[in-house]
Amino acid sequence: MIIDRRAVTFGFLNVGHFLDHLLMLLFPTVVLALGAEFAESYGDLLWLSVLGFVAFGGGALPAGWLADRWGRRNMLVVYFVGSGAAAIATGLATGPLGLGAGLFAIGLFAAIYHPVGIAMVGETTEKIGRAMGINGVFGNLGIAAAALVAGALIDLASWRWAFFVPGAVAIALGLAYAAWTRPTEGKGIKKALPSGQPAGPADMRRLWIVIVVATACGGIVFNGVTIALPKLFDERLAGIVASPAQIGGLVSLVVTAAAFAQILVGFLIDRYPIRLIYIGLSLLTVPAMAAAIHGTGLPMLATAVVLMMLIFGQIPILDTVVARHVPTAWRSRAYAVKYVVSLGVGATAVPLVAELHKWEGSLVGVFAVMSALAMAVAAAAFWLPAFRRLPVPAGS
């Protein structure tokens, strides 16, 4: 039986994306079980997670730089084994200091995945859009599964096992990936599949501006709407949901269902002009937001699903553009910049939603700001260079 090495590598990359987001989001559930043992308040303990998210964002740049020099395959092994070891160390913590150090280490190793793993996804197939869409779904499923996995392991054993088990799985995957691949794989130069016109100096400058503007505005929209969704359901689904648990479950279902829109968009951007699809999704987000914020009951719920599909559907677009048109020697660094901007600027959505809701007493102002930012994304997408697709060489 002939084994498709690219398909197996793609499988490792997808599971790696799932684990990346799962490991980063275990603590918000684990913290609920720590109050008695550590004699600290929920708020004080939750602040420890900030260290991990700072490392998660800031660590992307050095990770991308190292990957372009040392090899992406090597960095992916470090990601799996390092994040797994950090999770196990976090589970062994005996106080807040140890917890904070463990969460920081998880964030630092987890920061490797996006600039390295996403760059490698673009090298596994000529159908880059579809691959990015599928990989994105795995990442979002990791977000959705984190609370479920942590809660189940806490109930079955203890909060420590909520870190031990995912950590052990990550280490096992890292060792399996190291055994499966060769040290020369993943360096990018020989593995890249030329499916798009390389960007010249002028187009590259223009592309960087689009990436930064669209990523910054899109990051705030993604985080802002996701953060506001539970409150939106609480305000607009009275009589349908009656408890925080029901609201949380409904949000998880909506987010999970919407994540699969990335596969559809990936299919489309492999066949049609990517700029038109990006503009269309961004512009359609605006009326969807208006319908969601002014609707009630089941019609609002249906609109919310459409809105989240439009937002999630935009995720693989810029990743695909980078994979097609940024020279492979710079690709990990390009993804690093993209994710630093996305995570850094996107973090401002938390105080933005909180302050606007406190000032106005509703989410109308929040969604108005998000609509304006969606229009800015559409404007940036309009300025995206109209790259010419190149045929994939036979046998690649």
Image: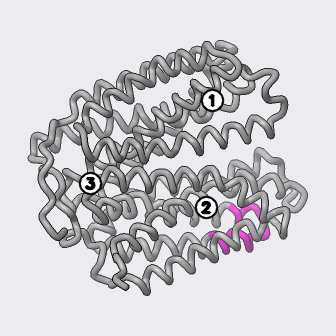
Q: Which residue is mark 1?
A: 228
Nearest the viewer among 342 and 308 is: 308
Earlier in the chain: of badge 2 and badge 1, it is: 2
Q: Secondary structure at mark 3?
A: helix
In this rendering, position of residue 11 left or right of residue 106: left
Earlier in the chain: of badge 1 and badge 3, it is: 1
Question: What is the quadrant of the N terminus in the image?
Answer: bottom left
Q: Which residue is mark 2?
A: 23
Check disc 3 and give the amino acid type: Ala
**Res. 68 image quadrant:** bottom left
Question: What is the quadrant of the C terminus in the image?
Answer: bottom left
**Res. 184 image quadrant:** bottom left
**Res. 350 image quadrant:** top right
Q: Are marks 2 and 1 in contact (CB under 8 Å)?
A: no
Residue range corresponding to the magenta coloring: 87-99
What percent of the width, then of the height, locates residue 116? Answer: 37, 63
Q: How is the image coloured?
A: one colour
**Marks 2 and 3, how far apart at CA:** 26 Å
What percent of the width, then of the height, locates residue 173? Answer: 53, 77
Q: Are marks 2 and 3 in contact (CB under 8 Å)?
A: no
Q: Which residue is mark 3?
A: 323
In this rendering, position of residue 358 left or right of residue 370: right
Query: Which residue is painted at 44% across and 62% down in the image?
Result: 113
